[in-house]
Image: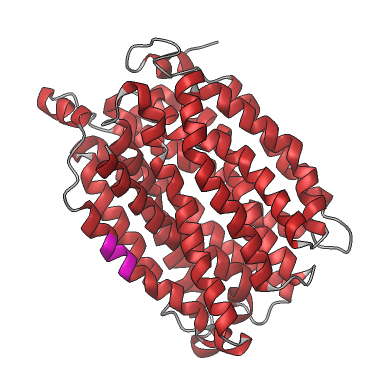
Amino acid sequence: MLRLASASLAGTAIEFYDFFVYGTAAALVLGPLFFPSFSPLAGTLAAFGTFGAGFLARPLGSAVFGHIGDRYGRRPVLLASLLLTGLATVAVGCVPTYGTIGVAAPVLLLLLRFLQGLGLGGEWGGAVLLTAEHAPERRRGLWSSFPQIGPAVGFLLANGIVLALSTTLTDAQFTAWGWRVPFWAAGVLALAGLWLRRSVEETPQFRALAETGRRAQAPLAEVVRGHWRLLLLTGGALAVGYAVFYTVTTWSLAYATEQLGVGRSVILACIMAAVALQGLATPLAALLGDRYGRRPLCLLGCTLCAVWMFPLVALLRTAEPLLMTLGFVGALFGMVTMFAVVGAYLPELYAPRIRCTGAAVGYNLGGVLGGALTPIVATALADGSGPPWGVAVYLSGIALLSLGCFALLPETNPLVVRVRPGAAAEAATAPA
């Protein structure tokens, strides 16, 4: 299990590195380089628009790779998704700017971001099922939390490289070529990830499906036709986690540097400290989910997020490093309370024959609802001289929406409530 979980964690860390390094670049340099005719605010909004394209691609990627995972195995998904995301990320670092090729530059940027999203949409389902379907029942939440640590590791890696470049290069050097280096590094990381995953074995549950001929012929159609309510509930439930995470890691970076005058290195260090604590807290929250159930942790996390959004804005507004870090830590603590357990929760909601598609599409639908628009909406709401309380209202509203969705989902931890395989999905999709 440790070897499997480590391979899963490494892969998600590398793929989220690819995804996050784009978000950091969008907040710092992509606006002036690829949308120079726009005002600073409009350029940032446009850069975040290309950032959002990756989220729109993720449900499509989860449907495509989910079909592969449910028809041909979880292992092919792990390799193909990593390769696609890595190649797209390296290519972003090679795209000429608007000043060199004109409007083709943002078009290429948009296309490559879309390909990044396709790859990442498939990654999560394969990585989580690799651990969830191998893990012993009593520790399924713990082992399934390893892929959930991957985003924190990927973010720290991406922003650590950006922070190192920011402190060693001049602003002119960073703008001219330094921002490209983290994208080029993705190629080396992708090769390392493929090497780690080369010997991963297929999961026992998929092997059983293949041997008995019970694989789904059209997994997506089966999920949409028979479990559409569950799909919508999981998407809505996970929206707040995405919204909070990208508010902290992407929007606050742009807001602090552009409107509060905080140094790029200072705000990056504050965010990285908070994300590091999030990564450390993930397995601890997962252990609580194994002991007390998945659903109570998710309800608690949504409640914490709803309560903390106004303190987050107030602490960010101070522009004091320690206070900003405190605000980020509180927000991410609420987020990780729920996201630490969803690696076990979502697969348990779906029967094995449609699990890769159902869990991945539901997870990435939450990314569209909570992650794609949040930096854009928050940037627009924060346009002004006063505190951006509108951002807090927006995030609290999403938290309450997610709270309501989790309240309608059943508990799935077999140690808390005994259910036969697929019964949770049937309960969630049954008429009221």
Please provide percent x and percent y for residue 413: 43, 19
Q: Main SS of the magenta segment?
A: helix
Q: Which residue sits at x=16%, y=25%?
A: 208
Q: Which residue sits at x=82%, y=51%?
A: 314
Q: How is the image coloured?
A: secondary structure
Indicate the quadrant containing the N terminus: top left, top right, bottom left or bottom right. top left
Left or right: where does residue 370 sit relative to residue 57? right
Q: Is residue 372 visible?
A: no
Q: Nearer the viewer, residue 157 or 15?
A: 157
Quick one: which residue is furthest to the left in this view?
211
Q: Nearer the viewer, residue 164 or 307?
A: 164
Q: Based on the displayed image, in which of its 4 quarters is residue 220 positioned?
A: top left
State yes or no: residue 191 in magenta. yes
Q: Where is 227 relative to 196, above or below?
A: above
Q: Where is 380 relative to 203, above or below?
A: below
Q: Nearer the viewer, residue 92 or 195?
A: 195
Please provide percent x and percent y for residue 388: 82, 54
Please provide percent x and percent y for residue 346: 43, 30
Left or right: where does residue 8 sit relative to residue 102? left
Q: Residues in magenta?
A: 188-192
Q: Is residue 126 visible?
A: yes
Q: Where is 162 relative to 101, above or below?
A: above
Q: Which residue sits at x=40%, y=32%?
A: 142
Left or right: where does residue 235 sit relative to residue 349? right
Indicate the quadrant containing the C terminus: top left, top right, bottom left or bottom right. top right
Q: Which residue sits at x=72%, y=70%?
A: 257
Please provide percent x and percent y for residue 151: 47, 51
State yes or no: residue 390 in magenta. no
